[in-house]
Structures are given as C-alpha cells and as structure tokens.
Amino acid sequence: NLFKSPDGGCLSPLGEYNLNLGIQKVVEPEIIATARDKPGAYDGHPFIVEAAVSLGGKDAKEGITVVRFANRIPLLFEGGADVATRVANSKIKWSSYKIDHKRDKIGVFVSIVSTKVPFKGTGKEYIGDDITEIQQSVKRALQGCCQQLRAHLAKRNALRDVKERKSRLLKYIPDVSKSLFGILEVMQKRKQEESDGVVRPASPRKRTAEWSPMKRIKTNEEDVNSILDRMSKGEISEQILKQSLQEAVEINADAVFGIDGNDNGDTRKGGSTSKKDDNDDKQPLCLVPIYDEPNCPGSNVIRHPLFDFYPINISP
C-alpha cells in the first residue's frame, strides 16, 4: 500500500466523557463502562467508533437495548439491520463477561463518526454490517466495555456470595450455640456422676466405634476437663458461645476481601453521583484513558488516583 490510512484527526467524535454523562443523566444505570476503538478507515474514509455498555437503570427492559449514533445524530429506525445491533446480538458472548443477556437489563450505546457514514437505504437510518472494518471496530469497542464490567461484576458477585453465606451462618448461630451448650451440660453431668461413683453402660455407638472404618477423633482429657471447669465457673454459657460464634463469622467474612466491619459491600474509594443505600451493590463507573494525551504543561495537570484533569489554557 503506497498511501497511509487516514489517522482520524479530522473527525470530531462524541467523546467518552459526554457519552458517559448523557447515559448517567437519562438512563441512571447501576454501572457503566465506556471505550473507544482506535481510528480506522474503509475505502479511504476514516472513522472512529465509541461504545458504552450499561447495566440496570430506570425504565430499562430485560435483554439488550441498542442505542445508535452516526456523526452525533441518533438513529431511531430500522435498528434490527444495523451493524451495532447485529454485533451486540450475535458477535458478543455475554456469558463470558458474567452478564446474562436474557435477564439482565443491558444498554448498548454505539457512536460512529466518519467523513462518509456508510448508510444503507434511502432513509439513512441504519449502517450495514457488510463493511468488515466497521464491524470489527464495533466489536472491539463493545468487548473493551465488557472487559471492564467483568472485573467489577466478579467482585460484586463475590461480595454478594460472602454476604449471603454470612447471613446463613448468623441465622443458625442461636440453634448451634444452644446445641453446643446442651452437649456440654450433658458432659458435665456425666463427669459429676463418674466422680460420685455412678457407672453408666457404654452406648452402642461408642462400643462399635473402634470397629468403624471412620475412626472417631479422640478428645484430649485435659482439654475436656478445662472446658468443664470453665463452664462450672460461669466462663462458658450459651450467650457467650453465641457471641463468640457471631464474632468468628464477622471476622471471617470481613477478612475475605478486607472490608470493614459494616460489611455494606461498598469498596469504592471515590464519590459517585448516584445515591446508594445499605443494600446496594453499585460499583463505580469505568472509564478508560484517552488515546492522545493533551499537550499541556505537566505542572498544570491535576493528578488523582482515579483521574487526571487537564485544564485548557485559552490564550486571548
């Protein structure tokens, strides 16, 4: 090829920031990710594809809802034949990103800008999928969004599993503590009878234990006596057992992901514009870095663990 492909510098894309803000304002999703593919070209015409994938939101429907833009203008009709719709429905394996495309409320937003948008039909309401370069670019942009979501969804699902496991364990702690204390009371009673000279016949289970293929774990006599002595002194009670089990469950659940004692599932370091209650598992929105770093002095750049802010100096 004697000629270089256009670099897309002449194009004015919608921008991930504007796309993200617009989706947050209109859809109000639980989580959103945006991505922009590198500039491409077909038949000498440059194009840029930007995409966003959101989960949840007000008035959102189950399944995949595709919203399309061409040169910043929304396309409202003939969406079934559009390249964005076909890629989202047939080229993306949603289950690989821990997303259920049939039950989850998925919003797919695709913006294509080009010096010559390859519309199909006289109405210019959809972009055909016959141009391989655009189809592959849309697929890469959507996959970039899904890869961001997968990490957050995996962590959110793991946190939810820990909370459910913790809830189930706390539910049965009263019964377990009551049963444990009952066993200790029986052991203490038998110990007292043995000291008084009362001989009880061995239970059938105990007689056949040595013949069982599953050998019983032999308890240390000193440990048993120590526990019974503490019980007689009042250091062990049903309430103390219950409290100790609750503390053990809390510590184990908090140590899994290093979360605090509140265990509200919120691991975000930064703020968010959306409201969040105690039972909400929303995660921060995902943004990928811009491709071309603005040309401005490093001293004017505001650095933050979550973003870099580049102020624009407008000379008179």
Image: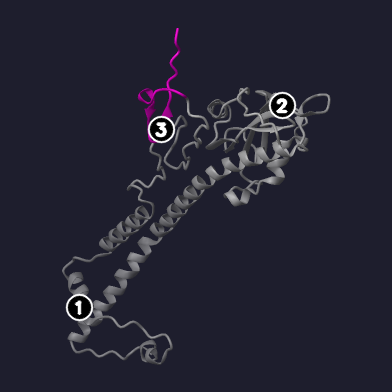
The secondary element bearing badge 3 is classed as loop
- Of residues 77 and 83, the one drawn nearer to the viewer in this rendering: 83
Q: Is residue 222 visible?
A: yes
Residue kind at label 1, given as amino acid type = Asn
* Image mark for residue 271: 3
Instruction: Assign the magenta stretch its main secondary structure.
Output: loop
Residue occupying image coordinates x 34% and y 82%: 217
Residue 298 percent across, percent down from the top left: 38, 26
Instruction: Count up the numbered dots.
Output: 3
- Label 2 to label 1: alpha-carbon separation: 80 Å
Q: Which residue is mark 2?
A: 75
Badge 1 local density, few (<14 within 10 Å), some, or many (20+)? some
Name the residue tied to disc 1.
Answer: 225
Apparent side of residue 194 relative to residue 311 in the rendered image (left or right): left
The answer to whether marks 2 and 1 mark residues whose Cβ atoms lie closer than 8 Å is: no
Horizontal side of residue 122 vs 96, given as left or right: right
Q: Give the mark toward the camera: 3 or 2.
A: 2
Q: Amino acid at mark 2?
A: Leu
- Relative to 60, residue 163 above or below: below
- Left or right of 23, for residue 47: right
What secondary structure is marked by label 2? strand
Residue 51 visible (yes or no): no
Quote the CA–CA distance across marks 3 and 2: 33 Å
Specify start and end residues of the magenta stretch as a single range: 295-316
Say which of marks 2 and 1 sits in front.
2
Which of these two is toward me, 187 or 245?
245
Q: Is residue 297 magenta?
A: yes
Residue 59, percent from left and from top? 61, 33
| Mark closer to the chain start, 3 or 2 | 2
What amino acid type is highlighted by mark number 3? Gly
Q: Nearer the viewer, residue 208 or 304?
A: 304
Q: Residue furthest right?
A: 122
